[in-house]
Image (spheres, helix red, strand yellow):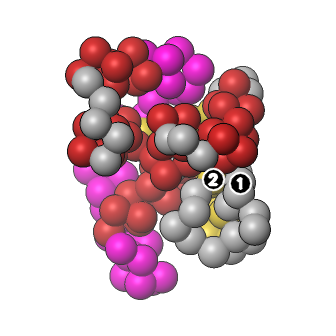
Amino acid sequence: MSALDFYDSNVLLYLASPEGKKADRAEELLNSGGIVSVQVLNEFARVCLRRFAKTFPEIRQALRDIRELCIVRPLDTETHERALDIAERYRFDIFDSLIVASAQLAGCTTLYTEDLHDGQRIDGLTVRNPFPS
């Protein structure tokens, strides 16, 4: 398990999408383990329900599979406060800032996401887009 990698929900959502190459890449990453936050699990569930029309049993099974492969970090006031600092300093959206803060507090060195700039460094955390064009 790579406990130094943090996955944003947009990466994990490819597991439920029809996009074959991206789904394969997401599965490859997830199979090596890593870290997600409760926020990531909630975003995953929301999009699976609304965009992919998955049933609750399907969503629960997918979430169980993710939790089996990844460490799940809670959201707490320390994460919230750090996210506010990140949002203020970098002008990120608060939800992106919560992802960055969760990754940093978990001791991760890499954040896999499509929402930020590939290669960007944020206080010791490197952003990677796992689906380069």
Mark number for residue 112?
A: 2
Tell me what residue is drawn at x 73 percent, y 32 percent.
Answer: 28
Q: Is the magenta stretch mostly helix, strand or loop?
A: helix
- Which residue occupies the foreground of this view, 62 or 91? 62
Q: Residues within 10 Å of mark 1 (few under 14, many from 20)?
A: some
- Which residue occupies the foreground of this view, 72 or 128? 128
Q: Label 1: which residue? A: 130
Q: Does the magenta stretch include residue 124?
A: no
- Which residue occupies the foreground of this view, 122 or 43? 43
Image position, residue 4 (x, y; %): 69, 40
Instruction: Specify the quadrant of the image occupied by residue 1.
Output: top right
Q: Tell me the amino acid under the disc marked 2.
A: Tyr
Q: Tell me the amino acid under the disc marked 1.
A: Pro
Q: From the viewer's perspective, is 57 left or right of 8?
A: left
C-alpha separation, residue under disc 1 versus residue under disc 2: 6 Å
**Comes first in the chain, label 1 or label 2:** 2
Image position, residue 120 (x, y; %): 68, 74
Q: Residues within 10 Å of mark 2 (few under 14, many from 20)?
A: many
Image position, residue 119 (x, y; %): 74, 71
Closer to the observer: label 1 or label 2? 1
Point out the stretch of residues depicted in magenta.
Answer: 64-93
Q: From the viewer's perspective, is 82 left or right of 77?
A: right
Tell me what residue is drawn at x 54 percent, y 35 percent.
Answer: 15
Of helix, strand and loop, which one carries label 1?
loop
Whether tag 1 and tag 2 are in contact, CB under 8 A, the answer is yes
Q: From the viewer's perspective, is 51 left or right of 117?
A: left
Of helix, strand and loop, which one carries label 2?
strand
Whether residue 76 is visible here, answered yes or no, is no
Q: Does the magenta stretch include residue 81?
A: yes
> Does 125 appear above or below 105?
below
Total numbered labels placed on residues in the image: 2
Tell me what residue is drawn at x 30 percent, y 57 percent.
Answer: 80
